[in-house]
Image: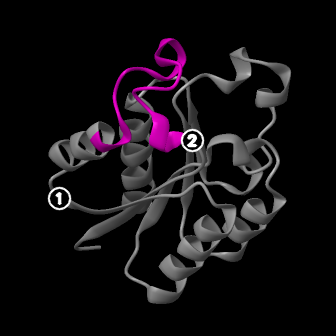
Amino acid sequence: MDIISILVLNGPNLSRLGKREPEIYGSRTLDDINKELVDTFPGVSFEFFQSEEEGELLEKLFHCEDLGGYSGVVLNAGALTHYSIALRDAISAITIPVIEVHLSNIYAREEFRRTSVISEVCSGVISGFGANSYHLGVRGLMGMLELG
């Protein structure tokens, strides 16, 4: 694969990074994280998308599949992780790999956050490394693509 093209997809409330509970989610904004990814992985073509709307995330996943040219998706689904069967089904409906990432360790938080309905259909899960979770997600995806 000559050019690796990755969609970094972010769900509800991630637009509030840097402001929302910095003791849990850190002080970096989503724009900061996106810029760090571009700087860290100059050989990767990134597209960044964030929405508060579940349907927009589903449409973006389908668009990636239908448009072609995408190597994979790094997804922080936010709260949708814990209850969105629609998002789970959308991930199942596409053939490109999706890596689930979380800034916080969802397994060390409130009981309702410890369940991910999307993990089972994702190619990998990274949780608890702050903004570095995105970097690890990209590295994991790149490693998978080199093996495939």
Q: Amino acid at mark 1?
A: Gly
Magenta run includes residue 113: no
Left or right of 55 on screen, residue 35:
left
Identity of the residue drawn at 47% across and 23% down = 129
Left or right of 138 on screen, residue 62:
right
Identity of the residue drawn at 84% across and 28% down = 112
Compared to residue 31, the image places residue 60 above or below, namely: below
- Quarter of the image that includes the C terminus: bottom left
At which x and y percent is residue 37? 26, 45
Q: Residue 59 falls in which quadrant of the image?
A: bottom right
Per the image, label 1 sits on a secondary structure element best described as: loop
Q: Which residues are magenta?
A: 13-31
Kindly identify which residue carries mark 1: 43
Q: Distance from label 1 to label 2 (Cα)? A: 29 Å
Q: Residues within 10 Å of mark 2 (few under 14, many from 20)?
A: some
Q: Amino acid at mark 2?
A: Asn
Identity of the residue drawn at 67% across and 69% down = 55
At which x and y percent is residue 133? 45, 33
Kindly identify which residue carries mark 2: 13
Residue 18: which numbered mark, if any? Answer: none
At which x and y percent is residue 76? 55, 46
What kind of colouring is applied to the model shown?
one colour
